[in-house]
Image (cartoon, rainbow, N blue to C red):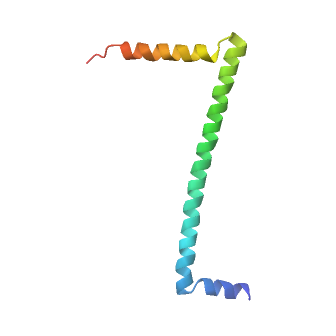
Amino acid sequence: MSFATIIARLFNNNNFQAFGTMIITLIVAWIIFVILWKLVKTTVRTAITFAAIVVLLYFGFGITPQDILHKISEITQNFSQTPVRN
């Protein structure tokens, strides 16, 4: 079967709708894949950056992760106790 025959059979009425639906499905799947890939890349990059900062603080300045969490909890408590002005 030649290439021209295959193309002609793909583009008859019944197969053309299925072929068009398949192309649209592939385009939508590709868009979703690209979005998810960017999300995973960003998440991994953020996690690596955060881990590097924590390691740098620990080995460079002796600040432990527990110290960081304690300071964060102090800051959030201060925000919750701050009066709101109208």
The percent position of residue 67, horizontal first and vertical second, equals 59, 13
Depth order, front residue of 27/47: 47
Q: Is residue 32 above or below residue 6?
A: above
The percent position of residue 22, horizontal first and vertical second, equals 57, 71
How many numbered marks have been drawn onto this rendered protein structure?
0
Q: Is residue 47 above or below residue 78?
A: below
Residue at 58% in and 44% down: 39
Outermost residue toward the top in this view: 62
Q: Is residue 81 above or below residue 43?
A: above
Q: Would residue 26 appear left or right of 56 to someone viewing this image? A: left
Residue at 61% in and 83% down: 10
The percent position of residue 33, horizontal first and vertical second, equals 60, 54
Q: Would residue 77 appear left or right of 18 to someone viewing this image? A: left
Quadrant of the image containing the N terminus: bottom right
Q: Would residue 72 appear left or right of 6 to someone viewing this image? A: left
The answer to which image quadrant residue 51 occupies is: top right
Depth order, front residue of 83/31: 83
Q: Would residue 82 appear left or right of 63 to someone viewing this image? A: left
Depth order, front residue of 66/83: 66
Outermost residue toward the left in this view: 86
Residue at 58% in and 16% down: 68
The percent position of residue 17, horizontal first and vertical second, equals 52, 79
Quadrant of the image containing the C terminus: top left
